[in-house]
Image (tube, grey):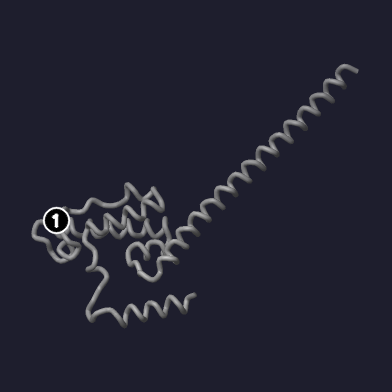
Amino acid sequence: MLARETERERERERDAPPDSSWAGLFSFQELRAAHLQLCAVNSDLEPCLPAFPEEQTVWSVLFGAPELSARHADALCFQLQVYLGHALDTCGWRILSQVLFPDSDDSEEYYESLGELRQKGFEDALQRAKTNLQQVSFDIFMVGDLLNIFMEHDLYLIS
């Protein structure tokens, strides 16, 4: 699988025009759209996206939009970095990379990774339910033992 991913990366590099960068491909509107897709995977991300300046591109903010101070641009970049790190921690690399850099021929793998994420969520919920059931079962067992002890104690006091 790793060899397949490495081969895809080489194909992307070979097919990419010279001096291209993925960083320049995103407008703030596109980042908001990616954010909505990531929120569909995990709603914890909803309040995390920083507020972007309207009618600005990422490049104009990074390289000196006249109406933004350097301090404000740095703060925005830092907030975006924190957001992307949180999205990576929350959704995982496969989903984040597929949302930001979709490959038209890898849609099956994208849905498979969403399915894997859901499956993991279900398995985690099942494990929590099993743990809770074991605890309740243990508690019931302990209550039964206590009742037996009280009954023996009462019989001892009666005799």
In the picture, the quarter occupied by the C terminus is: top right
Which residue lies under the disc numbered 1?
Answer: 55
| Percent x, y of residue 41 | 41, 53
Crowding near the residue tagged with mark 1, few <14, some 14–19, many ≥20 C-alpha atoms within 10 Å: few
Answer with left or right where residue 104 lies relative to residue 55.
Answer: right
Q: Is residue 25 above or below residue 80?
A: below
> Left or right: where does residue 150 sit relative to residue 63?
right
Q: 5 or 148, which is in the foreground?
A: 5
- Residue positioned 34% across, 67% down in the render: 102
Answer with the quarter of the image where residue 107 lies.
bottom left
Tell me if I can see residue 131 in this picture: yes
Determine the image quadrant of residue 35: bottom left
Write the residue at 24% across / 64% down. 26
Camera-nearest residue between 149 and 108: 108
**Seen from this angle, which residue lies furthest top?**
158
Viewer-side residue, 157 vs 109: 109
Q: Can residue 79 be seen at all in this image of the molecule?
A: no
